[in-house]
Amino acid sequence: MLLNVQGKQAYCYTGGKAFDPALPVIVLVHGAQNDHSVWGLQSRYLAHHGHAVLIPDLPGHGRSAGPALGSVEELADWLLALLDAAGVQRAVLGGHSMGSLIALEAVHRAPQRALGLALLGTTYPMKVSDALLETSRSNEEAAIDMVNIFSHSSIAHKPSSPGPGFSVMGGARRLMQRMSARNPDQLFHTDFAACNSYANGEAAAGGVACPTLFILGSKDMMTPPRSAKLLTGAIKHGKIVTVDAGHSLMTEAPDAVLDALSAFARSAVSTLAT
């Protein structure tokens, strides 16, 4: 689905179903150097089981027009403008990694829009090492390889990983390379710099009143579960689900992530109904 957001074209995947804003809406935001496809294994199920699903490509990513936005605050404003463009008043907002900060800041800015908040592979502060930040600026291909290794718990995933012959690491690497090819204007560095400079996470978390879910990977080297303690401590009513995966938990543990997201979305909607 194509929308006009802040005067530019924005693409949203809707899970293989026509988008109906009258249904309970769930919005899932991807992380750095990614696009909507990282949610493919969860979004289709949700769209075919009672939810209206919006999975946007952030500006400058995938099929959405650029330029990429340089701060979490700008991206949160863009996300709220996307809801307006789609005719969505309230939704469950979720995000992975950089996307989790965007969803958190959007809830902070417009709490009345959130039925619930799902934070996957999250941490705050989301600091990026100086070496990786510089590599993302000067040698994006090397940064892609570094992050791809750090984001996965194994180079040889079990045969039960999605799709016969499907390479979890290979698919993630090709996706990031494709983002570079589509937007060669230092996209990875722009994303990492936005994560690194975001300074409102503690204040935003302290004001979250809606139901909240944390999904954390037990083997996550990019955002280890222990590093989320500031957020989980600030959102004391949040539920924590830990899955057996690294940072790329939506592909490494797709069923466990889906089970947690689906149950949370149903609960958030039922809470509203009562």
Image (cartoon, rainbow, N blue to C red):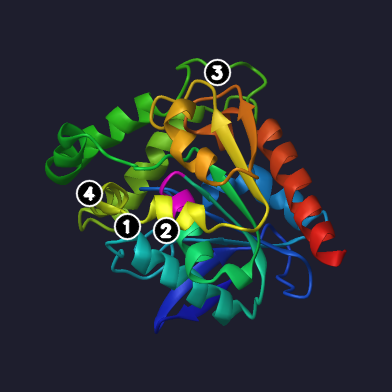
Quadrant of the image containing the N terminus:
bottom right
**Which circle's residue, 1 or 2, is located before the other in the chain?**
2
Q: Which residue is mark 1?
A: 182
Horizontal and vertical percent position of residue 263: 78, 44
The picture quadrant where one finds residue 123 is top left
Q: Amino acid at mark 1?
A: Arg
Q: Are marks 1 and 2 in contact (CB under 8 Å)?
A: yes
For label 3, the residue is 157
Which span of residues is magenta-colored? 97-101
Given the image, on which type of amino acid does mark 3 rest? His
Residue picked out by circle 2: 62
Which residue is at 37% across, 30% downward? 148
Element type at mark 4: helix
Picture residue at 72% right of the left edge, 69% below the top = 18
Classify mark 3: helix, strand or loop: loop
What residue would you read off at disc 4? 189
